[in-house]
Image (cartoon, rainbow, N blue to C red):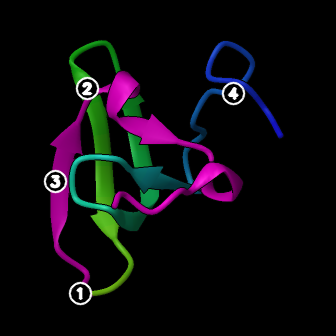
Amino acid sequence: MSTPEQWAPREGGTAYDRRSGEPVRVMAVHACGVFVRYLRDGREGITGLGELAPPEDRTEEP
C-alpha cells in the first residue's frame, strides 16, 4: 500500500474521493485543485489533493 506522502494523483489515473466515497478519474491537477470525473455517473467536480486517496487504499466508513 502507498502512503499519502508517496502517492500523487496523475491525469488520466483513478483515485478515491474521501468526501463522496466514490471512485473518480483525475482529469487535471492544478494548484487550485484537482478536476475529477466521477466514474459512477460521469459528473465532473473539483476537489483538493488531501481529499483523494489511491484506489487501493479505499476503506468503508462505518
| Residue named by callout 3 | 45
Dividing the image into 4 quarters, which one contains the N terminus?
top right
In the rendered image, residue 3, in percent from the top left (x then y), is placed at 72, 24
Look at label 3 and name its amino acid: Gly
Q: Is residue 52 magenta?
A: yes
Pointers 2 and 4 in contact (C-beta within 8 Å): no
Q: Is residue 28 left or right of residue 1?
A: left
| Residue named by callout 4 | 7
Task: Mark 4: give few (<14), some (14-19) or many (20+) Cα within 10 Å.
Answer: few
| Residue named by callout 1 | 41
Dividing the image into 4 quarters, which one contains the C terminus?
bottom left
Q: Which badge, 1 or 4, is on the more N-terminal residue?
A: 4
Tag of residue 56: none
Q: On screen, 21 above or below 11?
A: below
Pointers 1 and 3 in contact (C-beta within 8 Å): no
In the rendered image, residue 57, in percent from the top left (x then y), is placed at 65, 49
Specify start and end residues of the magenta stretch as a single range: 41-62
